[in-house]
Image (cartoon, rainbow, N blue to C red):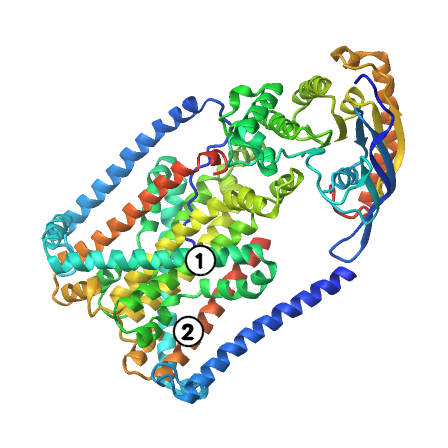
Amino acid sequence: MSTDQTAPPVTGIAVHDRGAGSAPRRRPLSGTRLGVIAVLVVWLGAWELTVRLGLISSTFAAAPSEIAVAMVDLAGNAGVRAAFVGAIGMFLVSFAIAAVTGVLAGVAMGLSKIVYRVFHPVVLGLFSTPKMIFIPIFILVAGFGVVSKISYGAVSGFFPVAVTVTAGVRMVDRRLLLAARSMGASRLQALRGVVVPGSLPAVMAALWYGMKHALLGVLIMELFASQEGIGHYIGLYTSTFRTDRVFALVLGLAIFAILLGSLWRWQEKRLSRWRGSHG
Amino acid sequence: MGTAGVARRERLTVVAIQLGLAAVVVAIWVYQTRVGRVSPILLPRPERVLQEFPELLRDPVFWNSLRVTALELVGAFALAAISGLLVGVVVGRWAPAARVATPLLAWAQTVPIILFYPICILLFGIGPMSKVAFGGFYGFFPIAANTVLALSTVPARYLSAAAALGASRRQTVTRVLIPAARPLILSGVRLGAALCLIGVLAGELLGSTDGLGYRIASSSGSFRTPELYAYITVALVLVAIFNLAITRADDRNAQA
Amino acid sequence: MAETTSAATLTATDVTMAYQTQRGHTVLALDRVSLDVRRGEFVSLIGPSGCGKSTLLYILGGLRRQSSGEIVLDGQRVTGPTPRKVGFVFQDYTLFPWRTIISNVEVGLEFRGIGKRERRERAEHNLDLVGLGAFANAYPSELSGGMQQRVAIARALSMDPEILLMDEPFGALDEQTRTVLGEELARILEKTGKTIVFVTHSLSEAVFLSDRVVVMSARPGRIKEILTVDEPRPRQPDFSTSRSFTDLRNGLFELLHEEVRAATLAEMSGAGGDGRRG
């Protein structure tokens, strides 16, 4: 499920002097940034007012200021901290598993026609089914603990990685392969010199999808198997109507996800200067 | 003609390997359950699962949960489509808003939306309303994002061509803007519909009182494993049919 | 250029290329084409779209296998790419977008296993030769099409092949750029003395650059006629305004006009099939 259809704006036009090329791009951005900040401020203010004026009962919603206080509160709570760190740790492990297995499977399907034709329909089918209807099976087999959370996260991450890497490897420009062959590249050289760099953007995108889905998988499991971990605290605070704390936990995880995304985009931009006008 | 023969042989090889692998999986399943190495609570015998289907079809509880899920899906999709298109059109036709909204929508897409389900329960209770709200929220983003993208990236040369040919403002919108933006908007709607279903099912699984997702969760909770497998299979088939249906709908529109 | 030996370096004998369309029709792209290319010679292939001239070039370079017939290079049969002797310049540049310009020029030498220092030196030399030494560290996407094609020429030259096969190298460029690049190519070739086989659509380009112009017929591709251009080298820009140039160009136009007409009519009646290029 690639929801990331908002492509970055295409810069277009070959620019010879890079220094001059990047300068005019910054100005509209800062105006945009101001707009973003303004929208966020207005939104937070409206939210605060709605709750403060009692338009929504504070049983069901908490004002931003209350959430901020609850966040500080919870940060001091060792149990919550451990649950948070535990969730991130499980996410990292399941992402690592998904990345390695997904890239291997994707490369195999991308390079071998027979592997592609046998497995790709199956992988694609599983990719587009909501995996969470299998959650009860994971729990039957592996219980409510760490193992089932990590394995479900890994399975969630595997399919988008495998599908995207396959597409990336298969889409490597045939003409570039021909050019390499005309210059006497061996099979291995063509693989290393053309297929690997040519599919690298797709692999990076694949890893990002994998990361997103592994995180999603671990969090769904946290919410479903709520005997321990963050799901436990969210459940506890929901049933005791500590709405501010529920919001604080949710927003804490959301901020983690946004930071993760920004970090990823930043390093991706750093790595791919050559994509200048290819979007 | 020689190439056609090669292609046919290749296709047969592929099908043979696929059938072989499937047979191996089924054989392992049958063998493991026969020998009794796996507890029937984890993995019931295949025929036990098969027996479950006719019972399911006779069970009014099943039909009722199907109806609940379908209604929730309709509500969620209506919510997602209306709000997504509305926001998308407003934002996409007003350039400064598009520039401001693009990073916000991108951020929203990095956040695992499932996190907000507990908040939906707080706000709308454990009944169908929280599923509608959550499913709608889930499906909103691709629809809004694609509409913004579609409307803000209609090539300027189409608009100048329309102006040069004497199109009125209204004609520009109905004859140029909408047709040019439609494929991308529709693919967003399609994706949104698929996500609405996922959102509704996820909500039902995580906390609800009825619906397919609820049946899956409750049959596993009470260790009625054959029923669990039957429900999962039914859910898979329904999701597949639904996805196929929206793909088809999209195809026909794309051709028109 | 001192001794233009008439001994053929690259010979095609009865080369036929047939392939199947998806509907199962057999299309004859090349029909028993025979051609000798001599050392140091510049040969252009010209003909209507779909006449198989690009296909012939790919077969000459060993990048495609012919259905029947034989290609011989310096007495040896060609069965695959021979990058030590034959360099390729493609129509769409095919630079590797993830490599800098200089490392694109180096890449063939890298495939050959030549040490870093030597290949950098040779790449720099050839990049200077095409006048792009200042862009060594830019990326292809930062260069214009004409510049990218010059890089591709430098890349082919840095392999130091005896023969350069060029597939409509200036086809994607505008008229002014292609004229200037053509003159520049003439200048570069004077320095390097390579043997060239050059596929083009442009009559002027063919006459201006070539020793011989091979005119091909509409599908199935056959050699219709070979024109000789007896103009001393190096060719000067004012050759293109001379009487002999105009006569040759007009003659070529007459020859081609019939073929293009035939090809277009065939296409309109639906008999042209598909596959514009090899």
* Chain ID, mark 2: B
Question: What's under tag 2, amino acid-wise?
Answer: Ala
Left or right of residue B194: residue B206: left
Disc 1 crowd rating (10 Å Cα; few below 14, some 14-19, many 20+) is: many
- Image x and y of residue B256, in percent: 59, 54
Against A70, is B201 above or below?
below
Q: Residue at x 47, y 48 (%)?
A: A202
Mark 1–mark 2 distance (CA, rounded to whole Å): 26 Å
Residue sitting nearer the eye, C269 or A200 = A200
Q: Is residue C151 left or right of residue B80?
A: right
Task: Please say whether residue B196 is visible from this viewpoint.
Answer: no
Subunit of mark 1?
A
Crowding near pointer 2: few (<14 within 10 Å), some, many (20+)? many
Q: Quadrant of the N terminus of chain A?
A: bottom left
Residue drawn at 41 percent across, 56 percent down: A100
| Rendering coords of residue B158 (x, y %) | 55, 36
Residue type at numbered disc 1: Gly
Residue C230 quadrant: top right
Q: Which residue is mark 1?
A: A102
Q: Is residue B41 above or below residue B212?
A: below
Q: Residue at x 81, y 16 (%)?
A: C2
Q: Is residue A260 visible?
A: yes
SS for tag 2?
helix
Q: Which mark is residue A26?
A: none
Q: Nearer the viewer, mark 1 or mark 2?
A: 1
User: Residue A184, how many percent across, how many down?
Assistant: 65, 40
Where is mark 2, residue-wise?
A: B235
- Please give left or right for residue A63 compared with residue B145 in the image: left
* In-front residue for pair C70/A11: C70
